């Protein structure tokens, strides 16, 4: 063993064999570098190796070596789009042009049996940790988290992300786009930030928090700070802005440290709702007339394309069209017109997103780094979304809460579909077709329509079977070990002094060798579970539970007993790629064997307790700063408080009271608001008159307004609402008063069921992003007077007996889990 390696091992406190470390230059010199031992991350500070005497002339300087990845370690560009199934991209047989993905497929490999978890944040948690989604607390999306280890939306410290591992091994790490892996109750500036990208190993974050955001006025952050880059920029769209930011980041990194490898995690919001591409892309796709013949024809076309491309086996069967969805020929002319528009805008969003991804890839090439960059591009984090209802919607928050808008009403938005005044989603029938050749959609973990994703890998010079196809069965948890093998970085034993749990994925790097193109999959077993729908893959067989109710009903139907009330089916996917033929009656012993294996895997990976509730979980109490509070007080101007840290007025009575000072000349502006154009409320002065507006998901607006402008001086404005519960979405009576005198009273028939906003904030004295009524004012609508005190008081919600019983049960379960 060389003296140099012995020295660096001693300096860095390495406990593992020192041969794993590589040193360049002379230790102690400014140019020296070293790799680090995987025993401990971050690497401990080395001991000073110079000489210190009483004066500098007799002393010897010594610099700690810079930490770098192993020699030859590539850059890594990890790309994943959103809510797009197997048949969306042209790369996997779809009709929507995705030339950036096509380009990578021609220089690399396409994977035809690659899988997600069937839902957004669970897939993303698995992707960045290399562990199953329940193992890292994401058995479901964070907005529905509950107090169990597999469902609490917290990535534990013994499960470091690939960002942390690569950063502490000398990589520049960055994250652009969607962050759906921070608990919703930690979105505020109060932190803590250990579950933000910065706490997950990413030195730079530019993106949005939560499941979705408006692309025209996004809820956007640079690191921990909310930003508003669209102000003063007509035509701004986040999809382009994000690519610009990633490109500028790479240019800056290349200028400062051209030899420093980067890990860039690029996850745009496309094509999750709202579908909001630019008008240019909508026009471009519309002129291609891809969808004029309807979803039946689309399915047949995609299936034929897939056969030609070889991305499905020759004997694959096209699964039957479900009876619950109409055939195209049964529709009237208005429905067809609307549905074609929905598909055009979705497709434009797909193509637009891929185009901007192509610009990011081009920057890598322009910097001369393409040959040494491993690029992984995954189409979708789950199957195509069915959350737009069977007829689509111009306002996706309505559809998410099982509120359908008739076709006739939707047609009023035909010309502005996808613009800033809509947040659209498409019909489930399109979603089903875009998951060709499989059954089902997003949310359904038990069938490949919910979990099969198109994925390509490209690394010129290392993946030499250009244009090849790989059929091995793999899962998103296999991406992290693949990256580690490519970079030569070992999984750490400890991170920040905490012993690490094993990575549960297996590397896919063995598939890069052409000699292994037909090699057996090194993933022999994989479980799937979401909302009680479950499946288990083992050695070419799949046992699966058909959903007892379709996901587009959002759990509003009565569900069966979750553990034993589900039917199981059996498929031999070695011969039946699309899960077309149920063999459960023919092979009951095999089915029973797989059912038992599921229980073993579920116990191992924190899947229990199973839970098939959906909307109810949105109302479960979580450990936020608002937990248990019924009174909130604010003063002055305050903006940007996330919904999870704000008073929740849903399904309960409440009182908003504001003590304000009106200046000479009269007052105007926002006093308090939560939400905006697509749902929320606002208490404000309009030309001096007090107004309270309740925006029901852009479907209806209810308004209380005083007739007289307030005179200069101090006033108390109160809006008091008495809710007609128990239950969700009930109506109530609101009274607006000034200085103890009633100025407006009205009873409304219904309120927002469970989700007022996803990407708007709670503001006092100003309104950021969008207003609750564009006809009344334009943001920021800053209050011209002074807010001495704003108080919001909440009453305990009234709930139906069954709903209260479920909530009480979940509260008790959360308490038990915490003990």
Image: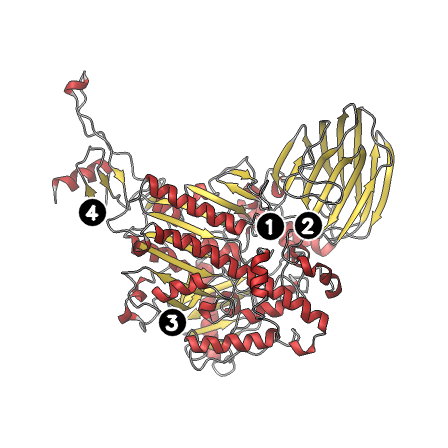
Classed neighbour count for the residue bearing mark 1: other residues with Cα under 10 Å, few (<14), some (14–19), many (≥20): many
User: Which sits earlier in the primary sequence, circle 3 or circle 4?
Assistant: 4
Marker count (numbered): 4
What separation in Å lies between label 1 and label 4 (alpha carbons)?
A: 51 Å
Which of discs 4 and 2 lies nearer the camera? The answer is 2
- State whether residue 256 is above or below residue 468: above
Residue 577 can be seen in this image: no
Q: Which mark identifies residue 621?
A: none
Q: Which mark identifies residue 471?
A: 3
What separation in Å lies between label 4 and label 2 (alpha carbons)?
A: 59 Å
**Residue at 67 percent of width and 60 percent of height:** 393
Query: Which residue is disc 1 drawn over?
Result: 214
Classed neighbour count for the residue bearing mark 4: other residues with Cα under 10 Å, few (<14), some (14–19), many (≥20): few
Query: Which residue is disc 4 drawn over?
Result: 17
**Residue at 42 percent of width and 73 percent of height:** 311
Which of discs 3 and 4 lies nearer the camera? The answer is 3
**Position of residue 349 measured from the top left corner of the image (x, y, whole percent):** 55, 59
**Marks 2 and 1: CB-CB under 8 Å?**
yes
**Position of residue 778 measured from the top left corner of the image (x, y, whole percent):** 70, 40
Query: Which residue is disc 2 drawn over?
Result: 678
Classed neighbour count for the residue bearing mark 3: other residues with Cα under 10 Å, few (<14), some (14–19), many (≥20): some
- State whether residue 783 is above or below residue 505: above
Nearer-the-camera pick, 457 or 358: 358
User: Is 89 on the left-hand or right-hand side of 23?
Assistant: right
Q: Disc 4 on helix, strand or loop?
A: loop
User: Is 736 on the left-hand or right-hand side of 795?
Assistant: right
User: Which sits earlier in the primary sequence, circle 1 or circle 3?
Assistant: 1
**Position of residue 83 measured from the top left corner of the image (x, y, whole percent):** 54, 60
User: Which sits earlier in the primary sequence, circle 1 or circle 4?
Assistant: 4
């Amino acid at each position: 063993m060389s003296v140099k390696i012995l020295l660096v091992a001693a300096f860095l406190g390495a406990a593992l064999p020192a041969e794993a470390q590589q040193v360049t230059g002379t230790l102690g010199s400014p140019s020296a570098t070293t790799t680090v031992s995987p025993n401990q991350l971050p690497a401990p500070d080395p001991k000073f190796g110079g000489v210190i005497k009483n004066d500098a002339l007799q002393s010897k300087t010594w610099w700690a070596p810079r930490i770098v990845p192993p020699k030859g370690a590539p850059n890594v560009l990890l790309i994943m789009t959103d809510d797009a199934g197997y048949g969306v991209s042209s790369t996997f047989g779809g009709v929507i042009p995705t030339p950036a993905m096509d380009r990578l497929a021609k220089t690399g490999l396409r994977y035809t049996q690659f899988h997600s978890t069937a839902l957004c944040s669970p897939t993303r948690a698995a992707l960045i940790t290399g562990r199953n989604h329940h193992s890292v607390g994401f058995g479901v999306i964070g907005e529905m988290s509950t107090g169990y280890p597999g469902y609490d939306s917290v990535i534990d410290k013994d499960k470091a992300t690939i960002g942390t591992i690569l950063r502490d091994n000398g990589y520049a790490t960055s994250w652009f786009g969607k962050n759906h892996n921070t608990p919703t109750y930690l979105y505020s500036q109060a932190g803590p930030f250990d579950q933000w990208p910065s706490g997950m190993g990413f030195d730079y974050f530019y993106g949005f928090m939560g499941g979705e955001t408006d692309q025209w006025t996004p809820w956007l952050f640079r690191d921990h700070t909310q930003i508003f880059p669209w102000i003063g920029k007509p035509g701004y769209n986040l999809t382009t802005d994000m690519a610009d930011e990633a490109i500028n980041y790479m240019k800056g990194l290349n200028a400062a440290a051209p030899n420093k490898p980067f890990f860039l995690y690029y996850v745009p919001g496309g094509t999750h709702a709202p579908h909001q591409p630019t008008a240019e892309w909508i026009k471009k796709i519309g002129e291609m007339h891809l969808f004029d013949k309807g979803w039946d024809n689309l399915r047949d076309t995609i299936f034929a394309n897939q056969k030609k491309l070889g991305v499905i086996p020759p004997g694959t069967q096209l699964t039957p069209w479900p009876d619950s969805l109409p055939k195209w020929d049964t529709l009237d002319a208005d429905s067809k017109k609307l549905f074609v528009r929905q598909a055009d805008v979705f497709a434009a969003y797909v193509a637009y997103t891929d185009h901007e991804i192509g610009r990011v890839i081009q920057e890598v090439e322009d910097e001369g780094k393409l040959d040494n960059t491993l690029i992984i591009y995954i189409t979708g984090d789950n199957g195509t979304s069915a959350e737009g209802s069977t007829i689509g919607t111009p306002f996706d928050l309505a559809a998410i809460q099982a509120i359908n808008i008739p076709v006739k009403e939707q047609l009023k938005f035909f010309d502005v579909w996808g613009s800033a005044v809509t947040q659209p989603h498409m019909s489930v029938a399109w979603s089903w077709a875009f998951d060709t050749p499989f059954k089902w959609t997003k949310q359904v973990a038990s069938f490949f329509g919910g979990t099969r994703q198109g994925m390509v890998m490209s690394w010129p010079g290392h993946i030499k079977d250009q244009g090849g196809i790989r059929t091995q069965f793999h899962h998103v948890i296999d991406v992290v070990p693949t990256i580690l093998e490519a970079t030569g970085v070992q999984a750490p034993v400890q991170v920040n002094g905490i012993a690490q749990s094993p990575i549960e994925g297996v590397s896919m790097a063995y598939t890069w060798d052409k000699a292994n193109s037909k090699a057996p999959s090194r993933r022999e077993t994989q479980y799937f579970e979401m909302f009680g729908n479950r499946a288990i893959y083992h050695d070419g067989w799949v046992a699966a539970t058909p959903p007892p109710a379709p996901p587009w009903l959002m759990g509003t139907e009565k569900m069966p007993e979750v553990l034993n009330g589900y039917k199981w089916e059996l498929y031999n996917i070695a011969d039946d790629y699309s899960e077309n033929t149920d063999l459960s009656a023919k092979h009951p012993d095999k089915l029973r064997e797989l059912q038992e294996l599921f229980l073993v895997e579920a116990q191992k990976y924190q899947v229990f307790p199973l839970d098939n509730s959906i909307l109810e979980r949105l109302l479960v109490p979580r450990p936020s700063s608002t937990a248990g509070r019924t009174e909130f007080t604010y003063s002055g101007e305050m903006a940007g408080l996330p919904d999870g840290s704000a008073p929740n007025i849903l399904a309960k009575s409440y009182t908003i009271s504001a003590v304000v000072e009106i200046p000479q000349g009269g007052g105007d502006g926002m006093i308090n608001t939560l939400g905006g154009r697509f749902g929320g409320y606002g208490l404000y002065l309009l030309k001096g008159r007090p107004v309270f507006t309740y925006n029901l998901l852009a479907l209806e607006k209810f308004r209380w307004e005083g007739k007289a402008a307030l005179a200069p001086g101090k006033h108390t404005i109160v809006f008091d609402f008495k809710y007609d519960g128990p239950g969700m979405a009930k109506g109530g009576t609101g009274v607006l008063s000034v200085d103890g005198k009633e100025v407006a009273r009205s009873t409304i028939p219904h309120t927002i069921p469970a989700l007022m906003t996803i990407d708007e904030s709670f503001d006092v004295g100003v309104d950021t992003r969008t207003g609750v009524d564009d006809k009344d004012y334009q943001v920021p609508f800053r209050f011209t007077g002074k807010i001495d005190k704003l108080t919001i008081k909440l009453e305990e919600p009234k709930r139906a007996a069954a709903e209260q019983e479920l909530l009480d049960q979940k509260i008790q379960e959360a308490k038990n889990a915490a003990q």
